[in-house]
Amino acid sequence: MNTAIDPFLDNPFDTHQVRNTVAPLENFNLFTADPALVEAVRREGGGAQAEALRALGEQLGRAGTLELARLANQYPPTLHNFDRAGNRIDEVEFHPAWHSLMKLLIENGAHASPWLGGEGAQVARAAKYLMFGQVENGSQCPVTMTYASVPALRQAPAIAAKWLPRILSMEYDPRSLPVEQKRGAIIGMGMTEKQGGSDVRANTTRAEPVPPEQARAMFGDEGVDVYRIVGHKWFFSAPQSDAHLILAQTGDGLSCFFLPRYLPDGGRNRIRVQRLKDKVGNRSNASSEVEFTGAYGWLVGKAGRGIPTILEMGSHTRLDCVLGSAGAMRAALTHALHHARGRSAFGKPLSEQPLMQNVLADLALESEAATAFSMRLARCFDQGGDPAQQLLARILTPAGKYWICKRGPAFGAEAMEVVGGSGYVEDGPLARLYRELPVNSIWEGSGNVMCLDLLRAFGKTPAAREALAAELELAGDGEGAGHGDYVRYTQALLADVSQPVADEFGARLLAERVVLAVQAGLLLRHAPLYVSSAFVASRLAREPGGAFGRLPAGVDCAAILGRALVLP
């Protein structure tokens, strides 16, 4: 009789068995697992692309795609200022995973699809972007800037004629070459400087016009006004881009310029990358500090009108901040809920523990409300020709960027706490998500800048209040649970925004109230009653608070969590 001990099955020296752990959440469909997103796409006008979104959701949820995200952040970009012979090149080297993610984004039109036409194109593109936000956030940065550059560049027909065909191309071409030799182009931006930050009017970078005959001799007849630029940018996003939009001072004031990486004669423009930023998050993406030592730039828009010109870009990048935060929050929720369903404590799964249900359901409400709001905002951009929708976007864009992006870091921390110590280490995605979430509050205008922008919208455009009132009234005549609190809340809000004197001191609270009211209205109209009533009871009937897990008694947590993540 063989009495040998099998070392793999019954080793008396093993210290423990691995059990009660949860496998990674992967190989699932990001679109079909999210009923709130599926419903929002359909009702906001993007339903014609539902099948394409389903296919993309499956691709993004694959283990291999999620591994690309890990690798791109594990091996961040490196800067090479010089080649082996000592020539200045300022090239950024990326891990192959980064290029795979960029290719996936570009091939699916995340940078361009709304500008190519089609019903509900902004909404469908927003859904793509929100799902990409659940996978990897650094690669979204250059894609956002490329997407947002199109309205600004259309103000410069000569530049647009040459560059837009490559910007709108569905081919990702990372080669460092003059644009004429490329199949696709990426656009970056650089506005802030050391001394000013958000106060771009304090910029000191200066631009001097090049005499027309000299410009023609150097570059041919490009049909543009050429300037020589000297100065710096403290944040210059995606220096590997084929061109950047920047702000610089001219004799007429702050102006907007288009700086190609390569000049028409094939030489490199004099854009010197000093270093890459060592950032808290968004580490897969290259952000840099640069100096312009006589770089050539092409004027976009009118001289002295740089801020209005660049704002054509800014409104779209701010939309993406909202979408990106909503996507990252959704990812944090799904990982936390998946863990809680598979992990047991005190005799039953975490997801069935009453207090944990309160936390998870509260997170699920926040995520669904963020999704509903961001997709509604995307419809405003689809219907930009409608003055009412244009006014509503003017309000909801800064308010949403403030509140939804501000909720992100606390949301990520709470999701991490659900997982516990395993969520705090770098083995899983929650640590990376947590580091990513603050950037959308900071980039493209901090919270205070957004709230002051909201005040300006109400102060300069009285009709903005009517646009907000019309949106809120769509949910105000019901009789179900939560409607009474909703009507009282929105009436008080509309009374306050009708006051002629703006209260700068309370601008943050105003922005919060605007977003909560719109979110509640959308949920009352479109979400199940167990979702909308819980949201109103926990956000409108009382302050939302600084922590999650504060839902009142009687909330149907099981139903909320069942809707939050639908897996086969």
Image (cartoon, rainbow, N blue to C red):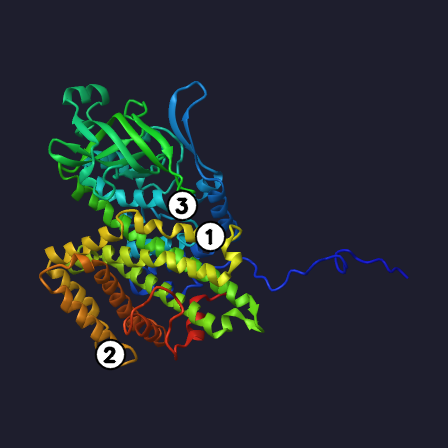
Mark number for residue 280? 3
**Position in image of residue 42 (x %, y %):** 33, 64
Tell me where residue 447 appears, x and y as whole percent: 26, 53
Please tell me which of labels 1 and 2 falls first in the chain. Answer: 1
Q: CA distance from mark 3 to mark 2?
A: 43 Å
Q: Secondary structure at mark 2?
A: helix
Spatial separation of the CA atoms under disc 1 and disc 2? 40 Å
| Residue shown at the point (30%, 60%) measured from the top left | 375
Disc 1 versus disc 2: nearer the observer: 1
The local secondary structure at tag 3 comes to: loop
Q: Is residue 450 above or below residue 361?
A: above
Report the amino acid beneath label 1: Ala
Q: Is residue 36 left or right of residue 455?
A: right
Q: Is residue 409 visible?
A: yes
Above or below, 472 against 16 in this view is below
The amino acid marked with disc number 3 is Val
Tell me if residue 8 comes above or below residue 288 in the rendering.
Answer: below
Residue placed most toward the observer, 528 or 18: 18
The residue indicated by pointer 2 is: 484
Mark 3 neighbour class, 10 Å CA radius: few under 14, some 14 to 19, many 20 or more: few
**Secondary element type, mark 1:** helix
For the residues labelled 3 and 1, the Cα–Cα distance comes to 11 Å
Residue wearing tag 1: 431
Left or right position of 163 against 473: right
Q: Amino acid at mark 2?
A: Gly
Q: Residue drawn 13% across and 37% down?
A: 302
From the viewer's side, name the closer residue of 543 and 33.
543
